[in-house]
Image: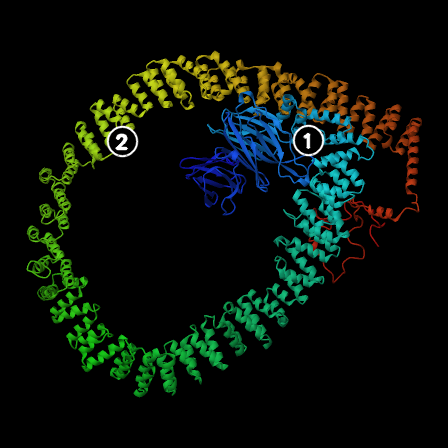
């Protein structure tokens, strides 16, 4: 285990990989190796076998590298992801995994850690400059000594250390910028019993200061572990801690920063032999040595500091650890220490303490303490020292960052803030950003972004002019804002910024955030054509159908507005396709953009009109434009263009070239011909003729070329084209009578108009072209030309001259055929002889000469015999009518090609002898078959053929074959006779050859053939041939004799018997083989075993006896076979022999055979069967002697076999021999030897054996022995149920309980024992259940025991178990359903811990029903857990008495201000007529139906409740209802207060009039006083004057006059002219603050529109913007930018009239 990713286990035949990060999934690889280690970072597996080491990449399944070491590896380890360390007996090597290099030797092992030491550890420092090798060895004084070697890679020196474990670690030290590389190691010197921990820095640059080093600290080893020693030291890099694990299972926890021991405990009784850290959590993995348990050791941070404080009593360590690791438990220590340092004036130390305290002391109060401390002369202020210390160690929190920023920014040092932000030392917040904003907008933006203050961040973007960043930022953070108003303000102030913002808004992810049309209109209304264009291009880039109108307007404003080039570029890019093409086409035509206009027109008349200007168009455009037209339009346009003169001819030709396939070549030709444009037609057709497949194109091109005198082109097309109609072209060329006939020559030559060409040239006296044609153009057509010349009566000398001129180029066959048909063959003799003289070997030439010589009788036989080049199939038939013998010679010359013709002519003309000789010489079996096959039809023709066949056979037998001296010829002839099924003729033939004396008399093949033929044709002759002939293949012939088709067994036996004699077979082995074959005929074919036994006795050969024994064995004659095999001393069939003997139960007879077999064979079966035979005959003495002697028997199998057959005594001997105590115990059981069976089971120590012995003893009522065995069985959980079932079935319950009670004391007792005992108690001893559950709860399977308790109705133990197992839902359920199980304290303890909240509401009903007096206590417990509205509804459904019971509960939870609770309590208060409580409830809690309550109380009989109703109406602004209620109850003060609170002048005026009507003068005066600010003076004066209340109204008037005077005075002071010294900046600032954003941006609010007077669009020739309204009302629709005069106060702008001049 090199890391927390993999555990690798090496097994004999495989390597198992356990993936710790994938739920311990196991992968097995069929790899054989001694050791394997997995790379800690990647899936690279290193394997070791002997001196060979290899690396494999498991992901790619490739071998990366391998190496054969010089000496064995004693330890290896991955020191990093790239390096594998290899330790040999003398040195240490490093092997790099990233390249193909060999292992590199690092250093030699120190003498103190020599070959006698066992290496247990190797470490490499993080900078790879230090190595630590650790090992252990036997201490002469006793115990285990540890030695380590510290090696410096740079200095190449080693230092020995006395200790057992060590490791390197990088840590951050307080007060230092750089990290420290420390070595943490254990030291135990031989002369010092103390164990010490060393922490020392290695590798520090001296120029940076002295290295870090701690004084050695003593490790507190417990007294019982005096001989213990460390086996590994693992670093927790996350928390700067070290774990030291010892051999005896102790673990020590050290603080590396101080070197102190923080904790010690024993975690296992075994040795943790391999460990590794888990970097993500700081924990340590370990594996025990014997049981292979995987341990995970980690820090319990919650309890560490309290443990250090309370147990170790080390306050200083607790403070340091709590501060460094951020652990709880030291808050009071920090406070005490801080107060002490502040009191002592140690400001710096106090600041360090706060920095190291985590969040315990970093509060505003601490900052205030430092700010209150006066500064010392010459020293910085304490608060700055505090902040400086914090910045060195930690990141400031929000309050600290703000307090530090204030003085720094006041001093004008924002660069410090920038540095701290870059180093992430400040906590970014909105308040911090607000502080920085006036000083540095960019820095403030950074703060706002980090603190996610989106509105402030966007405001910064606006101030910085980064409008394009607003939308992406808002979208990314999901911030919603009013973009329309922002865009309106930017439009006049910063058009480019408005454009950038609009682009961002319309391109926002998820769709546009503004209305595109309204925004475009806003831009254009400001005469911003360029910005409008840019905006619409961005908005319409998706080219959607719904934007068709906007696309049209975008092009229109540029075409009309004087920027046609912009529109042209837009159309050129093709990004818009849905606009009104017809309308845009007209605009393009007006603008003189002919090409664009043509692109947009579809009507042919419009297109023709535009193409009147085609001379101003790009020719390439004109050509490409035709691709958009259909055929009819294209033809019409072409006609129109060509009719305008030759200026368009070239472009028309180009159009025709490109679109001839679409438009049709015929139509295009008609267009050109109709305009008499021959030259244009020629150029057009010249471009397409090479690719066109239209015959008319090629014809018209030839005609136009001839008309223009382009004869070379005409000749080329006639020569190369395959498309034109040859007849039509031929007729045209003949009629044209061209001065150069070569085009006609090519046409006629290619399309086989040779006769017409010859006639044309001959009749037009162009004889030189005839000679040119046959010599240079087409010599192969010479025969046709000559034939036509013959027909035309041409001069023979001219013909001969042509032939001689053509020479060998003329095809001879065609020429000869034409000459023969015209009886002119002899005229060719000179030409043919000339060809032969040149060495011609053409068959046609020699055939023609042969015919001439045969006709002339010019020594034809010599020609036929000697000439090698003629064709026999040609001259043979030619000779048949003249001389058959010449035909035979010709056919024979064919060497097999003319066999059919040769046979036919031989039979026709009686040439049988010649044919017989020919057949023998040919040696062709197929040819023989043709002449020897008999015709079975039976007609006259068949009879005639049979006569011919017999004559041929006679000639072969009498003459042809006897004359032959070739063995191959004889062999082939014999095979032919055999194939023709002529056995009689073949026997006659062979007897003549073999028996009558010839060169082939001793030929083995012929003798074999003679005997075989006789076997097939005449069985009676076989025996005589066997006696007469001696040179034949005896074995093969004999095999044929015994075959199923012949069954000549006696003949075969005679052959084997004859050739077994010495005169025929000299070798003894071959003689024996023949004898075996002979007896094989008797036993295998004749089935005569008695005769075979006599023959075996006669020859007395072991192979013969063996053959006889096998046959007897097959015939189930086991006893006889045993005798035969013994005589043969043959044990080869021992397997089958044993099976047959067992089947026949010949156990006594088989023993001699098995003893014989064991002399030569050492086979398991032989010894096994011999033992079995002894056992079956009960010969136990010989059995025991044999078993104890040397043997290879399978004792186990034969023992099982004997046991199965009830031979228990024999089985006992066998099991005793092999120490199979399990089976031996069973034998003792069968023999009722129970004590012996227990002893055997003890030796076997197998659960199955224990179980069977236990059950046997139980059946025999040997309870003590059964208990002994049962204790061993119940150790295994899988067998508990079977034991319980067996005991229970027999009814021995007491013994069963006693067995399990004894099992409680087992050392390896498991949970199943305790569980089953608990279940048994529930069934048989219920009084012990509760005690058992309480004592052994941690060892119980709670679910099983609980089910047993419930079945036994033992509910109290069930509740206890459920609660102890934290199954509170079930515990509550039982207590609710089972009254005896209820316990209020337990119930309340459980109900708050249930997982299903519904149970709580069921508990409410349960308490209301069963325990109503305890309901309040229940709700106190559930107050924070339940929905109080639901509980109140439950109370209501239960009844009014339930509400009364729950009143105390509802008062307790009313603080949550829930509607249901408030209404229920209010109802109770009303019922109880407790108006004071009701008034308090209404004042404090407003969440209820107040209007409903007021309506209900309005008619209540008690005055106070009616006042409460008026009060509720007043609280809900129902002023009239409240005042009316108060009037009815004459509660004048309530009326006045309500009217004043309403602030409604009408309501107050009505109340004043009411008081006047009711003559309530004092109330009238009180109302004026109370409602002074809401009463109009005229109303008060009027009512006072009318009702004579002058004195009552006078105080109001006096106060009103004073208020008016004060307001006028303040107005005069505010409106007086400004002083002369006021600077211009203040004026500018004043104007800058008119309207707009708070940041001073100008907002134009006045006027009826966005534009300025006098700056509207020009009439008549300007841009028509009416289309943007599109049927909408004059006002903008929702979602667009608002009208400037809608929703804003008018006439508040810069000019009085709302506009600008």
Looking at the image, tell me whether mark 1 or mark 2 is earlier in sequence order: 1
Q: Provide residue 29's location: percent of width, then percent of height.
A: 43, 39
The local crowd at label 2, few if under 14, some if 14 to 19, many if 20 or more residues have their Cα within 10 Å, is some
Question: Considering depth in this image, is 1623 or 1096 the residue closer to the camera?
Answer: 1096
**Which element type, helix, strand or loop, lies under badge 1?**
loop
- Figure check: 1418 above or below 1049: above
- Image quadrant holding the C terminus, namely bottom right
Q: Nearer the viewer, mark 1 or mark 2?
A: 2
For the question of whether residue 61 can be seen, the reply is no
Q: In this image, 479 relative to 1204: left or right?
A: right
Rendering quarter of residue 630: bottom right
Nearer to the camera, 231 or 822: 231
**Structural distance between the alpha carbons of marks 1 and 2:** 79 Å
Front-lying residue, 1129 or 633? 1129
The picture places residue 1596, in percent across and down from the top left corner, at: 91, 29
Q: Which mark is residue 1192?
A: 2
Q: Secondary structure at mark 2?
A: loop
Residue count near mark 1 (Cα–Cα under 10 Å), binned few <14, some 14–19, many ≥20: some
Residue 358: mark in rendering: 1
């Amino acid at each position: 285990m090199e890391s927390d990713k993999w555990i690798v286990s090496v097994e004999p035949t495989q390597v198992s990989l356990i993936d710790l990060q994938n739920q311990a999934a196991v992968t097995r690889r069929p790899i054989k190796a001694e050791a394997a280690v997995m790379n800690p970072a990647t899936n690279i597996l290193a394997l070791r076998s002997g001196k060979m080491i290899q690396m494999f990449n498991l992901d790619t399944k490739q071998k990366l590298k391998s190496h054969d070491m010089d000496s064995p590896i004693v330890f290896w380890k991955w020191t990093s992801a790239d390096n594998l360390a290899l330790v040999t007996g003398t040195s240490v090597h490093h092997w790099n995994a990233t390249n193909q290099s060999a292992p590199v030797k690092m250093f030699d092992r120190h003498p103190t850690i020599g070959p006698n030491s066992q290496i247990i550890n190797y470490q490499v420092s993080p900078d790879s400059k230090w190595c630590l090798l650790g090992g252990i060895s036997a201490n002469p004084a006793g115990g285990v000594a540890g030695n380590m070697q510290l090696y410096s890679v740079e200095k190449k020196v080693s230092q020995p250390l006395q200790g057992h474990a060590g490791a390197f670690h990088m840590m951050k030290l307080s007060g230092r910028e750089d990290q420290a590389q420390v070595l943490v190691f254990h030291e135990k010197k031989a002369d010092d019993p103390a164990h010490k921990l060393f922490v020392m820095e290695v590798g520090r640059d001296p120029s940076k200061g002295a290295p870090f080093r701690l004084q050695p600290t003593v490790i507190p080893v417990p007294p019982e572990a005096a001989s213990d020693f460390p086996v590994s030291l693992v670093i927790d890099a996350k928390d700067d801690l070290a774990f030291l694990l010892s051999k005896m299972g102790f673990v020590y926890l050290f603080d590396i920063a101080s070197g102190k021991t923080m904790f010690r405990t024993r975690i296992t009784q075994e040795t943790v032999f391999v460990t590794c850290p888990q970097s993500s959590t700081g924990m340590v993995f370990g594996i025990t040595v014997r049981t292979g348990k995987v341990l995970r050791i980690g820090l319990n941070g919650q309890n560490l500091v309290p443990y250090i404080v309370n147990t170790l009593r080390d306050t200083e360590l607790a403070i340091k650890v709590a501060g460094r690791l951020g652990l709880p438990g030291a808050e009071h220590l920090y406070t005490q220490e801080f107060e002490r340092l502040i009191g002592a004036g140690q400001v710096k130390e106090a600041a360090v303490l706060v920095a190291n305290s985590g969040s315990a002391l970093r509060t505003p109060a601490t900052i205030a303490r430092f700010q209150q401390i006066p500064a010392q002369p010459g020293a910085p202020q304490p608060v700055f020292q505090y902040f400086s210390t914090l910045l060195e160690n930690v990141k400031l929190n929000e309050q600290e960052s703000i307090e530090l920023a204030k003085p720094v920014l006041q001093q004008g040092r924002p660069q410090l803030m920038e540095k701290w932000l870059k180093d992430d030392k400040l906590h970014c917040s909105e308040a911090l950003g607000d502080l920085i904003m006036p000083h540095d907008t960019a820095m403030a933006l950074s703060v706002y972004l980090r603190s996610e203050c989106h509105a402030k961040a966007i405001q910064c973007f606006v101030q910085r002019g980064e409008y394009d960043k607003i939308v992406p930022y808002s979208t990314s953070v999901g911030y919603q804002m009013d973009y329309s108003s922002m865009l309106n303000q930017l439009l006049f102030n910063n058009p480019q910024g408005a454009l950038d913002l609009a682009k961002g808004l319309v391109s926002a992810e998820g769709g546009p955030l503004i209305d595109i049309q309204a925004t475009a209109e806003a831009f254009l209304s400001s005469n911003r054509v360029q910005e409008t264009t840019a905006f619409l291009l961005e908005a319409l880039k998706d080219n959607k159908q719904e934007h068709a109108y906007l696309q049209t307007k975008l092009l229109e404003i540029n075409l009309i507005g004087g920027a046609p080039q912009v529109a042209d570029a837009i159309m050129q890019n093709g990004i818009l396709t849905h606009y009104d093409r017809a309308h845009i086409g007209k605009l393009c035509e007006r603008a003189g953009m002919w090409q664009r206009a043509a692109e947009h027109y579809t009507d042919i008349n419009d297109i023709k009109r535009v193409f009147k200007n085609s001379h101003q168009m790009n020719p390439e455009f004109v050509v490409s434009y035709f691709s958009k037209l259909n055929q009819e339009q294209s033809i019409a346009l072409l006609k129109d263009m060509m009719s305008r003169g030759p200026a368009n001819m070239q472009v028309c030709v180009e159009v025709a070239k490109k679109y001839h396939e679409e438009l049709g070549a015929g139509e295009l030709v008609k267009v050109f011909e109709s305009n008499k444009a021959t030259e244009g037609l020629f150029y057009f057709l010249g471009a397409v003729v090479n690719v066109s497949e239209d015959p008319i194109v090629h014809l018209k091109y030839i005609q136009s070329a001839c008309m223009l005198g382009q004869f070379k082109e005409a000749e080329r097309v006639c020569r190369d084209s395959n498309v034109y109609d040859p007849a039509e072209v031929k007729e045209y060329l003949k009629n044209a009578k061209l001065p150069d006939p070569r085009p006609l020559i090519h046409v006629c030559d290619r399309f086989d108009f040779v006769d017409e060409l010859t006639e044309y040239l001959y009749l037009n006296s162009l004889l030189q072209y005839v000679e040119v044609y046959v010599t240079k153009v087409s010599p192969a057509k010479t025969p046709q030309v000559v034939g036509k010349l013959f027909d035309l009566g041409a001069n023979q000398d001219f013909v001969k001259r042509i032939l001689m001129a053509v020479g060998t180029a003329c095809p001879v066959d065609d020429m000869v055929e034409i000459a023969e048909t015209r009886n002119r063959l002899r005229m060719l003799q000179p030409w043919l002889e000339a060809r032969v003289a040149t060495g011609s070997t053409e068959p046609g030439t020699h055939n023609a000469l042969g015919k001439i010589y045969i006709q002339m009788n010019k020594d034809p036989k010599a020609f036929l015999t000697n000439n090698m080049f003629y064709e026999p199939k040609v001259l043979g038939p030619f000779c048949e009518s003249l001389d058959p013998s010449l035909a035979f010679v010709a056919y024979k010359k064919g060497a097999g090609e003319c066999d059919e013709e040769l046979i036919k002519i031989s039979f026709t003309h009686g040439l049988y002898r010649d044919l017989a000789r020919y057949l023998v010489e040919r040696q062709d079996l197929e040819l023989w078959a043709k002449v020897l096959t008999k015709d079975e039809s039976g007609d006259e023709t068949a009879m005639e053929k049979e006569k011919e066949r017999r004559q041929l056979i006679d000639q072969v037998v009498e003459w042809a074959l006897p004359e032959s001296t070739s063995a191959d010829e004889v062999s082939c002839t014999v095979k032919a006779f055999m194939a023709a099924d002529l056995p009689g003729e073949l026997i006659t033939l062979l007897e003549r050859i073999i028996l009558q004396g010839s060169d082939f008399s001793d030929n083995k093949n012929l003798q074999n053939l003679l005997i075989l033929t006789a076997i097939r044709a005449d069985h009676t002759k076989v025996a005589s041939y066997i006696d007469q002939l001696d040179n034949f293949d005896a074995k093969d012939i004999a095999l044929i004799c015994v075959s199923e088709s012949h069954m000549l067994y006696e003949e075969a036996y005679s052959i084997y018997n004859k050739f077994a004699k010495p005169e025929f077979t000299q070798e003894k082995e071959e003689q024996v083989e023949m004898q075996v074959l002979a007896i094989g005929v008797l036993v295998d074919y004749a089935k005569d075993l008695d005769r075979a036994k006599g023959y075996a006795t006669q020859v007395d050969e072991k192979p013969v006896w063996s053959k006889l024994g096998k046959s007897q064995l097959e015939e189930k004659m086991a006893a006889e076979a045993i005798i035969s095999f013994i005589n043969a001393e043959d044990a080869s069939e021992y397997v089958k022999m044993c099976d047959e003997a067992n089947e026949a139960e010949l156990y006594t007879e088989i023993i001699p055979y098995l003893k014989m077999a064991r002399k030569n064979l050492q086979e398991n079966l032989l010894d096994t069967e011999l033992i079995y035979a002894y056992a079956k005959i009960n010969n136990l003495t010989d059995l025991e002697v044999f078993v104890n002697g040397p043997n290879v028997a399978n004792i186990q199998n034969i023992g099982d076999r004997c046991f199965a057959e009830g031979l228990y005594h024999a089985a006992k001997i066998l099991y005793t021999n092999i120490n199979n105590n399990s089976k031996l115990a069973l034998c003792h059981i069968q023999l009722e030897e129970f004590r012996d069976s227990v002893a055997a089971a003890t030796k076997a120590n197998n659960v199955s054996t224990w179980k069977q012995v236990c059950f046997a003893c139980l059946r025999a009522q040997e309870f003590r022995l059964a208990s002994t065995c049962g204790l061993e069985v119940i150790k295994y959980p899988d067998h508990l149920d079977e034991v319980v079932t067996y005991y229970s079935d027999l009814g021995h319950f007491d013994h069963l309980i006693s067995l399990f009670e004894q099992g409680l004391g087992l050392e390896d007792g498991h949970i199943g024992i305790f569980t089953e005992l608990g279940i048994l108690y529930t069934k048989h001893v219920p009084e012990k259940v509760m005690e058992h559950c309480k004592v052994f709860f941690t060892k119980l399977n709670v679910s099983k025991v609980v089910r047993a308790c419930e079945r036994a109705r033992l509910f109290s133990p069930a509740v206890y178990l459920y609660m102890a197992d934290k199954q509170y839902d079930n515990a509550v359920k039982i207590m609710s359903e089972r009254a005896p199980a209820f316990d209020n304290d337990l119930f309340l303890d459980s109900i708050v811990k249930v997982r299903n909240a519904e149970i709580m509401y069921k508990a409410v009903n349960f308490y209301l029903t069963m325990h109503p007096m305890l309901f309040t206590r229940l709700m106190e417990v559930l107050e924070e857990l339940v929905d109080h509205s639901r509980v109140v509804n439950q109370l209501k459904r239960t009844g009014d008495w339930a509400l009364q019971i729950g009143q105390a509960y509802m008062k307790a939870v009313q603080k949550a201000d829930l509607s249901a609770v408030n209404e229920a309590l209010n109802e109770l208060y009303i019922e109880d007529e407790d108006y004071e409580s009701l008034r308090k409830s209404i004042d404090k809690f407003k969440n209820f139906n107040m209007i409903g309550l007021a309506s209900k109380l309005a008619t209540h009989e008690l005055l106070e409740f009616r006042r409460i109703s008026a009060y509720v109406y007043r609280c809900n602004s129902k002023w009239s209802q409240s005042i009316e209620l108060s009037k009815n109850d004459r509660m004048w003060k309530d009326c006045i207060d309500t009217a004043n609170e309403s602030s409604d002048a009408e309501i107050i005026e009505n109340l004043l009039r009411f008081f006047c009507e009711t003559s309530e003068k004092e109330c009238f005066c009180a109302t004026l006083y109370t409602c002074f600010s809401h009463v109009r003076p005229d109303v008060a004066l009027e009512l006072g004057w009318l009702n004579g209340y002058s004195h009552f109204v006078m105080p109001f008037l006096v106060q009103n006059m004073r208020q008016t005077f004060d307001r006028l005075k303040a107005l005069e002071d505010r409106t007086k002219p400004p002083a002369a010294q006021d600077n211009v900046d203040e004026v500018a600032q004043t104007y800058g603050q008119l309207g707009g954003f708070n940041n001073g941006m100008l907002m134009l609010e006045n006027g009826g529109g966005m534009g300025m007077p006098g700056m509207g669009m020009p009439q008549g020739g300007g841009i028509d913007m009416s289309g943007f309204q599109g049927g909408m009302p004059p006002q903008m629709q929702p979602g667009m930018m608002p009208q400037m005069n809608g929703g804003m106060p008018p006439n508040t702008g810069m000019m009085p009239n709302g506009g600008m001049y």
